[in-house]
């Protein structure tokens, strides 16, 4: 496995950086190291935060020095297998495509609304990482025909469950927040719910597939979500 | 045993050491801004674990005790009084039923902590009692305190009359400038030599936009090479981001877990308290130390806090 560059982030954190690009291979290395550190349980490690291309490892200097941890991480990297991911888990996320900006996105792309929906729902998106807000997924792999610039003036409040496009990215707002993405639809499922176990629906490394639904289906799923009985369909497939 | 909120102050929240361990799901840690003041406050009232305390920002509140209680006040000096009498900070204090603990505006510093023997009894969410204002979870109903709220306290290890009274030297946040030590990186290579020199020598003024999320600074622009956009990666307490405008922003307790601006440096843990206690208009100077030095400073700080707890523990056993 490729050796990461180990950077310092103050006295309580190291960053294992595997590259400077967003690609599946680099990201797979990040998650492989994350899993290895968790499984191994390095004494003194408090928490790991995996991102696109690096793993931030928080540690307690009373229990382990940064130098020692660096050596351990590099040693651990050598033992990891670099085999490519062949299987993937796909989580199906139902979406009612009725967003306020759907027509604008279609106009910008010079496509019909139906075509935008078909392209958006027509592929699986890798979850590279979660961050920014609880349950906010950073997805990769959107069709470039539906890239669309962010709003020049962000909205002050976007509802939870809103599905949007911001530049080359697409994603779901997990809780009400300000935001500048173009809204193309809404999912009745909750990416984040503090009262649920687990509180966050998705894991990094999984894939998301958006499934278009109509209004009656939306209402029905929402009822099931409110009752706490709705479960997103998960399928295994090859990459 | 409980405490009634007669007036809440500007931004008073229930906080503890933070909701740690869930960064991989995107949960921001929250937790206290000034960990040193927080840990000393807990130690003074015999709370050995990370019990939840009240954090008040800039302007304190008024609170009435419904039963005898031991408490301690640390952090910024907000002119604390107990039923009209001035009280000392950094000391264990006994309050009787009906006593009113009152604060005014901070004279020096910004954040004040009140620890109650036993700690504040709110339901932990994902292992922490900290208030996460953005998500509306944890603490007291996921929000800042309001007039009329009643905080229930947990049972202390010993009844108040048997707990020892302790005093430790008070922290001072006086003065309007502070030197803050940093470890360069992880993205210091995004900046020019001149830019790094600017960062490590120019005075930076704390702006009024500063809050629990970040300390936004104003001052000389830091020159960067090609740009400061990076592929979003992890942010820690004390990460110093430089957005395109070129002035630094130190990420604090309510920081998001990840960010897309280059991080020129990270504040050493031991200097975070003096940074977060700066007020708008104050000046901050950054000074670089090695990661080794920073780890040494961290250990020194932890040992001092541990010694304080041990000293108190001896009194408690006696």
Image (cartoon, rainbow, N blue to C red):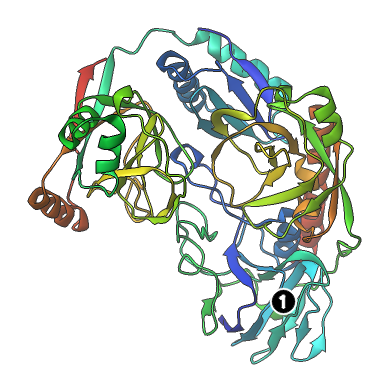
Quarter of the figure with the C terminus of chain B: bottom right
Q: Nearer the viewer, residue A208 or B154?
A: A208
Q: What residue would you read off at disc 1?
A: B162
Q: Which image quadrant for residue B92?
A: bottom right
Q: Nearer the viewer, residue B50 or A48?
A: A48
Residue at the (15%, 53%) spot, across then down: A224
The picture places residue A66, in percent across and down from the top left corner, at 71, 26
Q: Is residue B30 visible?
A: yes
Is residue A60 shown above or below B283?
above
The picture places residue A93, in percent across and down from the top left corner, at 22, 38
Horizontal side of B258 relative to B109 (left or right) equals left
Horizontal side of B241 relative to A18 (left or right) equals right
Quarter of the figure with the N terminus of chain B: bottom right
The picture places residue B3, in percent across and down from the top left corner, at 58, 81
Horizontal side of B231 relative to B238 (left or right) equals left
Residue at the (65%, 19%) spot, across then down: A6
Is residue A6 shown above or below B176?
above
Is residue B5 shown above or below B46?
below
Callout 1: SS: helix
Q: What chain letter is assigned to the residue under label 1? A: B
């Amino acid at each position: 496995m490729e050796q990461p560059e180990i950077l310092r982030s103050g006295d309580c954190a190291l960053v294992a950086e595997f590259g400077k690009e967003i690609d599946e291979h680099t990201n797979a290395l990040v998650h492989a190291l994350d899993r290895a550190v968790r499984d191994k349980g390095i004494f003194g490690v408090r928490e790991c935060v995996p991102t696109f291309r690096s793993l931030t490892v928080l540690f307690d200097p009373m229990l382990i020095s940064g130098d020692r941890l660096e050596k351990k991480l590099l040693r651990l990297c050598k033992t990891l297998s670099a085999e490519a991911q062949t299987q993937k888990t796909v989580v199906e996320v139902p979406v009612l495509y009725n967003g306020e900006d759907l027509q604008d996105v279609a106009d910008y792309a010079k496509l019909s609304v139906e075509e935008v929906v078909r392209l958006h729902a027509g592929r699986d998106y890798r979850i590279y990482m979660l961050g920014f807000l609880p349950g906010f997924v950073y997805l990769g792999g959107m069709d470039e025909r539906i890239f669309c610039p962010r709003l020049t003036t962000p909205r002050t409040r976007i509802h939870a469950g809103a599905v949007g496009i911001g530049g080359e990215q697409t994603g779901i707002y997990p809780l009400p927040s300000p935001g500048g993405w173009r809204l193309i639809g809404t999912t009745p499922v909750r990416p984040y719910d503090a009262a649920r176990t687990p509180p966050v629906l998705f894991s990094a490394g999984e894939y998301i597939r958006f499934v278009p639904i109509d209004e009656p289906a939306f209402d029905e799923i929402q009822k099931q979500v409110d009752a706490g009985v709705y479960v997103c369909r998960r399928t295994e497939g090859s990459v | 045993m409980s405490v009634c909120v007669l007036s809440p102050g500007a931004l008073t929240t229930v906080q503890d050491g933070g909701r740690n361990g869930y960064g991989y799901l995107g949960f921001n840690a929250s937790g206290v801004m000034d960990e040193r003041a927080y840990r000393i406050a807990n130690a003074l009232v015999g709370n050995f674990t990370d019990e939840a305390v009240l954090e008040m920002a800039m302007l304190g509140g008024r609170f009435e005790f419904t039963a005898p209680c031991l408490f301690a006040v640390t952090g910024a000096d907000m002119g604390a009084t107990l039923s009209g009498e001035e009280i000392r900070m950094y000391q264990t204090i006994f309050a009787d039923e009906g006593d009113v603990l009152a604060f005014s505006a901070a004279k020096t510093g910004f954040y004040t902590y009140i620890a109650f023997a036993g700690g504040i009894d709110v339901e932990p969410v994902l292992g922490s009692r900290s208030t996460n204002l953005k998500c509306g979870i944890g603490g007291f109903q996921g929000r800042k305190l309001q007039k009329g709220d009643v905080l229930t306290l947990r049972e202390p290890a010993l009844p108040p009359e048997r707990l020892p009274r302790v005093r430790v030297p008070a922290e001072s946040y006086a003065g309007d400038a502070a030197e803050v030590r940093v470890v360069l990186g992880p993205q210091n290579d995004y900046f020019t030599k001149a830019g790094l020199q600017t960062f490590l020598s120019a005075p930076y003024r704390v702006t009024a936009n500063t809050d629990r999320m970040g300390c936004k600074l104003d001052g000389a622009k830091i020159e960067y090479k090609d740009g400061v956009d990076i592929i979003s990666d992890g942010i820690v307490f004390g990460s110093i981001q430089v957005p395109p405008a070129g002035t630094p922003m130190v990420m604090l307790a309510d920081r998001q877990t990840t960010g897309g601006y280059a991080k020129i440096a990270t504040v050493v843990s031991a200097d975070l308290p003096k940074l977060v206690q700066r007020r708008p208009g104050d000046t901050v100077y950054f000074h670089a130390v090695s990661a080794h030095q920073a780890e040494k400073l961290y250990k020194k700080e932890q040992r001092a806090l541990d010694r304080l707890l041990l000293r108190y523990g001896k009194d408690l056993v006696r």
